[in-house]
């Protein structure tokens, strides 16, 4: 029995990502079979508890700690996002056959590397850990982003397609999709 291609898309549910997700749902819902989920849909109790314990609190919650990432908050928070997404993907691939995955953004794929090796995956980027480390962090403390940088690289290497958008000075939106040629050849 030949099944038609179907994509599973997991999107972050924060601020601008909500707009992005809604626009994607609207645009793609009529053009291809795709199941959309927000990263925090159907969270299990253990997932909520882990999020609260690991990825919710700043230690200590000062402006300096936040800007310098000395509590590794970004890494802890993004691992929680990755765990939410993994649980959601695993629950859904048990019910439906998917031919491709989509994650907006790369932290959602942090804990899905094994699944990405089995199924073609599209990663739509937002801010990378490298960009975050340069925004506020002193050069001498950028090492605090090393765990995120390593995971970003693994996700980028495992993805079939990376897509990124940026706002140009004249307020046009430039979207670039880069095919990873070494994987497609």
Image: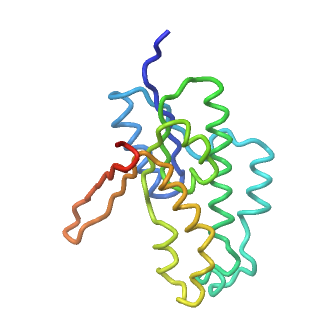
Residue 28 left/right relative to 78: left
Q: Residue at x 37, y 52 (%)?
A: 163
Quadrant hosting residue 25: top left
Q: Residue at x 24, y 67 (%)?
A: 168
Query: Percent x, y for residue 56?
Result: 71, 64
Residue 134 left/right relative to 39: left
Quadrant occupied by the C terminus: top left
Quadrant hosting residue 160: top left
Quadrant hosting residue 58: bottom right
Q: Residue at x 68, y 56 (%)?
A: 80
Asked if residue 164 is positioned above or below residue 185 in the image, the reply reads: below
Visual colour scheme: rainbow
Query: Percent x, y for residue 108?
Result: 57, 51
Query: Percent x, y for residue 179?
Result: 34, 49
Q: Residue furthest top?
A: 1
Asked if residue 96 is positioned above or below residue 83 in the image, the reply reads: above
Asked if residue 152 is positioned above or below residue 146 in the image, the reply reads: above
Total numbered circles: 0
Query: Percent x, y for residue 43?
Result: 70, 43
The one of 111 and 174 positioned closer to us in this rendering = 111
Q: Residue at x 73, y 69 (%)?
A: 57
């Amino acid at each position: 029995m030949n099944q038609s291609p179907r994509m599973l898309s997991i999107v972050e549910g924060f601020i601008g990502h909500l707009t992005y997700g809604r626009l994607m749902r609207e645009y793609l819902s009529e053009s291809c079979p795709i199941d959309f989920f927000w990263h925090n849909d159907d969270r299990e109790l253990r997932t909520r508890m882990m999020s609260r314990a690991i990825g919710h609190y700043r230690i200590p919650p000062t402006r300096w700690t936040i800007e310098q990432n000395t509590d590794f908050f970004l890494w802890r928070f993004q691992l929680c996002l990755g765990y939410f997404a993994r649980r959601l993907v695993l629950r859904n691939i048990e019910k439906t056959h998917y031919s491709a995955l989509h994650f907006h953004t790369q932290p959602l794929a942090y804990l899905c590397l094994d699944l990405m090796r089995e199924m073609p995956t599209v990663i739509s980027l937002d801010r990378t850990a490298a960009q975050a480390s340069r925004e506020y962090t002193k050069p001498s403390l950028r090492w605090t982003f090393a765990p995120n940088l390593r995971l970003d690289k693994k996700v980028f290497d495992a993805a079939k397609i990376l897509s990124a958008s940026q706002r140009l000075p004249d307020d046009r939106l430039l979207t670039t999709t880069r095919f990873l040629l070494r994987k497609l050849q």
